[in-house]
């Protein structure tokens, strides 16, 4: 990416919100939109075949990428939010009743809180919260006592979009499963910054969005264990999610189409393949990881040394910290800071980052967040640190 | 005695002041200065009924009426927002409700501020203007 804003070279440090896409994704999108724009899974003609093929190829690639057992376990959605809503509705309909409990954590994104609140309202169920400590780590020692025989599911983010800390999801799954509690992992950040193996994690559901991992917006994935997905009723009705339709009753298509009602964003979904191919190359590139880690460490120590700056999500073990930093600076409003940095050519995020409960936990009205991608450079990081100091001086 | 400046005069003055700066960073520096020099706003007047809805940062607008003229005082926890509202206070404070309501509130567009705010801030600005108009309408 090479573009300018306000006459300055753009430094894009808002990658956790949306990452920039590689040429391979744009090319495939363009090609399919131009040459293969036909509805999938329906007609027998050539163009429909091509569209269906690209869509199903992406599904197979996703399956291998996260190491799911079968393609039936990969449901395409419009994004992580849609995936969580699907589970909250459909799993909730089947398995959650009055007085049952759902656990979320204090560091969840709103998208992994509100669907569960809606479920609890609908079913008169109880929403419980696993809290984080001052450094932003989940209080794992409180988990066991939080679970009761009424607990049905726990939803946890793999990596918090505010704290940038990798949560011990495998350990959480072990604890939950030992008590018969299902686990949904929100992998919106996790899929970008770690090598995901859903069988190794052992979770029952894993969700993520395409637009954060190099694919086009409006694409997303729900991984679910086949035996659970089979038990769950459809979320939406219509389109190709059926077996037979009669006014006396309808039977449903087998997985995963049961959950893919209506015409899908087939052009977009196909881009998950080149997107994840890139993610895979990045995952295996040791040189790149080394330099990305250096940039991360440079920012981490630079920010910690900045006077009056409070960093949220701190750790002595850098293996559990991604290149994402949220912070506040004494006497400076995060909105002001973001605006001045924007005029200096740096795109950052400010506000509550869709995690209001976490803002309340730390007693702040909002934070400033910088989140990096593998294409960001040390030069950009140094320019950011320099600009941050200037902006703070202007505002104080 | 010098003739009192009209609402239009003040608007023109502000447009002139902003025309000196070429760079937006300089304009913001000026807005920040304006924010810092805004008249002190009492803590106990930071109540919910004075809070402008629709702003990302918190903004309070207070007023009192003397001799048929409305005097505004305002504050925000964000300094740039405070600078912007200081411009509005400078233009609309001490005016009659009729004067305020007959204004087209175009000064922010004239200085090019609106397109240089993020959409969320621009919406916040619209909300501030809306509140000033409502206060004027209620005090005719």
Image: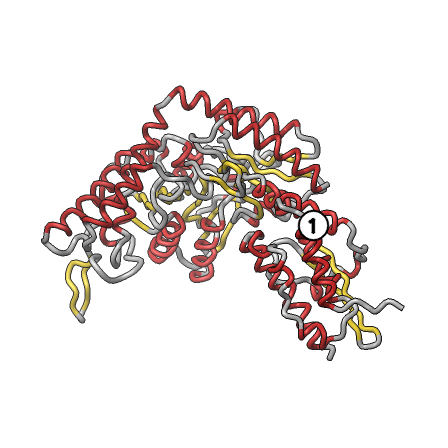
Give the percent coordinates (x, y) of residue A325: 55, 35
Q: Nearer the viewer, residue A157 or B37?
A: B37
Instruction: Residue at 61% x, 38% y: name it.
Output: A327
Quadrant including the N terminus of chain A: top left
Display colour scheme: secondary structure
A264 to A364, vertically: above or below: below
Instruction: Residue at 36% x, 27% y: name it.
Output: A283
Q: Nearer the viewer, residue A104 or A42?
A: A42
Q: Quadrant of residue A187?
A: top left
User: Looking at the image, which residue sits at the far bottom?
Assistant: B140
Give the percent coordinates (x, y) of residue A199: 31, 34
Q: Horizontally, is B45 left or right of A275 in the view?
A: right
Q: How many marks?
A: 1
Quadrant including the C terminus of chain A: top right
A151 to B127, vertically: above or below: above
Instruction: Residue at 73% x, 68% y: name it.
Output: B7
Give the percent coordinates (x, y) of residue A36: 19, 49
Chain letter of mark 1 equals B
Examine the rendering and report whether any part of residue A348 can be seen.
Answer: yes
B88 to A266, vertically: above or below: below
Q: Nearer the viewer, residue A11 or B16?
A: B16
Q: Which residue is mark 1?
A: B31
Mark 1 lies on a secondary structure that is: helix
User: Looking at the image, which residue sits at the far right?
Assistant: B1
Badge 1, how many Cα within 10 Å: few under 14, some, many 20+?
many
Examine the rendering and report whether any part of residue A361 can be seen.
Answer: no
Give the percent coordinates (x, y) of residue A363: 65, 45
Instruction: Residue at 10% x, 53% y: name it.
Output: A45
């Amino acid at each position: 990416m090479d573009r300018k804003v306000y006459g300055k070279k753009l430094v894009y440090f808002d990658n956790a919100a949306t990452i920039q896409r590689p040429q391979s994704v744009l090319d495939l999108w363009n090609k399919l939109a131009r040459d293969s724009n036909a509805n999938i899974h329906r007609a027998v003609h050539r163009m429909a075949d091509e569209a269906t093929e690209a869509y199903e190829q992406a599904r197979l690639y996703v399956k291998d990428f996260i190491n799911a057992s079968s393609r039936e376990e990969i449901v395409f959605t419009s994004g992580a939010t849609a995936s969580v809503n699907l589970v909250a509705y459909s799993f909730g309909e089947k398995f959650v009743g009055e007085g049952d409990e759902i656990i979320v954590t204090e560091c969840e994104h709103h998208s992994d809180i509100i669907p569960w609140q809606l479920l609890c309202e609908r079913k008169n169920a109880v929403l419980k919260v696993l809290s984080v400590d001052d450094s932003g780590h989940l209080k794992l020692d409180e988990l066991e006592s939080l679970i009761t025989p009424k607990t049905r599911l726990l939803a946890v983010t793999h990596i918090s979009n505010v704290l940038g800390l990798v949560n011990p999801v495998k350990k959480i799954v072990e604890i939950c499963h030992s008590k018969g509690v299902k686990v949904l992992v929100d992998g919106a950040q996790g899929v970008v910054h770690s090598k995901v193996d859903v069988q190794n994690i052992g979770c029952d559901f894993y969700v993520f969005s395409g637009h954060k991992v190099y694919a086009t917006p409006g694409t997303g994935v729900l991984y679910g264990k086949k035996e659970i997905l089979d038990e769950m009723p459809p979320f939406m009705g219509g389109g190709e999610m059926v077996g037979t339709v009669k006014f006396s009753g309808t039977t449903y298509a087998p997985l995963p189409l049961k959950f893919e009602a209506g015409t899908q964003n087939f052009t977009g979904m196909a881009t998950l393949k080149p997107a994840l191919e890139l993610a895979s190359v990045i995952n295996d590139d040791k040189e790149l990881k080394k330099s990305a880690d250096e940039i991360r460490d440079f920012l981490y120590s630079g920010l910690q040394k900045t006077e009056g700056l409070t960093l949220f999500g701190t750790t002595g073990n850098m293996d559990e910290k991604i290149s994402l930093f949220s912070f506040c600076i004494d006497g400076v409003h995060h909105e002001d800071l973001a605006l001045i940095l924007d005029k200096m050519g740096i795109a950052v995020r400010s506000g509550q980052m869709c995690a209001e409960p976490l803002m309340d936990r730390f007693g702040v009205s909002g934070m400033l967040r910088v989140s990096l991608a593998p294409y960001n450079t040390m030069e950009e990081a140094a320019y950011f640190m320099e600009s941050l100091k200037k902006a703070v001086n202007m505002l104080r | 005695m010098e003739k009192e400046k009209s609402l239009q005069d003040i608007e023109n003055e502000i447009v002139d002041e902003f025309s000196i700066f070429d760079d937006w960073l300089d304009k913001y520096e000026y807005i920040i200065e304006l924010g810092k020099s805004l008249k002190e706003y009492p803590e106990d007047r930071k109540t919910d009924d004075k809070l402008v809805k629709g702003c990302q940062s918190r903004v309070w607008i207070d007023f009192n009426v003397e001799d048929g003229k409305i005097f505004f005082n305002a504050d925000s926890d964000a300094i740039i927002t405070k600078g912007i509202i200081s411009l509005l206070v400078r233009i609309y404070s001490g005016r009659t409700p009729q004067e305020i309501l007959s204004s087209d509130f175009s000064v922010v567009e004239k200085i090019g501020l609106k397109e240089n705010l993020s959409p969320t801030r621009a919406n916040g600005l619209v909300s501030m203007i809306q509140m000033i108009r409502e206060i004027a309408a209620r005090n005719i």
